[in-house]
Image (cartoon, rainbow, N blue to C red):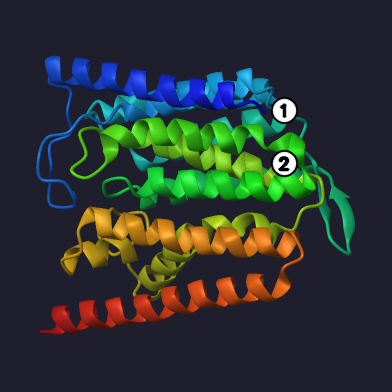
Amino acid sequence: MSLTSLAIAFLVAWGLTGITLALARRYHVVDAPNLRSSHALPTPTLGGCAILGATLIGAWCGGAQGLSSLVAASLLLLFFVVDDLCRPLGVTIKAGVQLLSATVWVVMSHFSVIHLPVIGLIGGLGVSILAVLWLVAWMNAFNFMDGIDSISSTQTIVAGVSLAAIFSYLAPDLQALPLCLAAAAAGFLVFNLPPARIFMGDVGSAFLGLCFGVITLQAMSVGLSALLIVLPLGLYVYDTSLTILRRAGKRENILRAHRQHLYQRLVQRGWSHGSVSLTVGILSAAFGASAWSAVSGRIELAILLGLSASATLVVGSIATWRQAEGSSDA
């Protein structure tokens, strides 16, 4: 994996995002804020196309494995441009595109085997079906969490670098994609820092989710611990899962748009987008460092970092939700 491919991913993302922003402003292709929005001004939403293109170009230059299947699956996600052009797609259509994209990757990559510690190799049609659902889950998680300036760009940079560091010990051949993904996200972040001049939209969030789903599946297929490779993304998993469970427990429609995620609650409490995204980055870096420490043999440090980040996240979320419920009762 060369620095040249990372520079290419960064520069392509930076250049394409700038061009997209200029064209969107010229032709007034923007997302107008509504009651559920976290932004106050009309903002272009096509930045995800730049991340997608830059990542794939950088990964190709870096010799990433199994790129043809990822390219095919990613191209299908460009259908979400329709939604990003302020022509909202229904839940059924979005789910159908996600399922099709995930299925294309699983079929083209012939993914049907996962190596689990102790158990060993397991495979078959059941694994392939679970892989499709796994990819769809990641696409939705990033879609749910991409609601404020720079949050998903920050998460992607930290998780990408963390996973590459983990792979440097256990699976060097898998480093190219997470590093190029991080580089492309950094190029986009130049324009996505608060106050954001452009958003990644559904194309970007779905693509990031697809890529991290693919990266984790590839890692599990060569025997890496699922817990360790998901840990750098633990904050997104925590917020998404807990919010869905809380809404389901209240018998609310979990598919209906809302503003009840932990990161949204923090903004409602007066936190700036930058403060929330920085907090996400710090906690994700702690989780990533914990996973890296574990694979590099620093078990005590891994436990300390993991428990500290987890405690901060849990205590902070409890306090935030209690305050939100108290405000609603008042």
Residue bearing the label numbered 1? 65
Q: Residue at x 71, y 65 (%)?
A: 294
Side (left or right) of 165 relative to 188: right
Residue 218, numbered circle: 2
Quarter of the image for residue 273 reads bottom left
Instruction: Specify the amino acid type for callout 1.
Output: Gln
Side (left or right) of 285 relative to 64: left
Q: Quadrant of the N terminus?
A: top right
Residues packed near mark 1 inside 10 Å, few (<14), some (14 to 19) or many (20 plus): some
Side (left or right) of 55 relative to 226: left
Q: Nearer the viewer, residue 95 or 221?
A: 221
Q: Residue at x 54, y 18 (%)?
A: 57
Q: Is residue 329 above or below residue 195?
A: below
Q: Nearer the viewer, residue 224 or 90?
A: 224
Q: Is residue 137 above or below residue 243?
A: above
Q: Secondary structure at mark 2?
A: helix
Q: CA distance from mark 2 to mark 1?
A: 10 Å
Quarter of the image for residue 108 reads top right
Q: Secondary structure at mark 1?
A: loop
Callouts 2 and 1 close, C-beta under 8 Å: yes
Q: Nearer the viewer, residue 207 or 17?
A: 17
Q: Residue at x 82, y 51 (%)?
A: 223
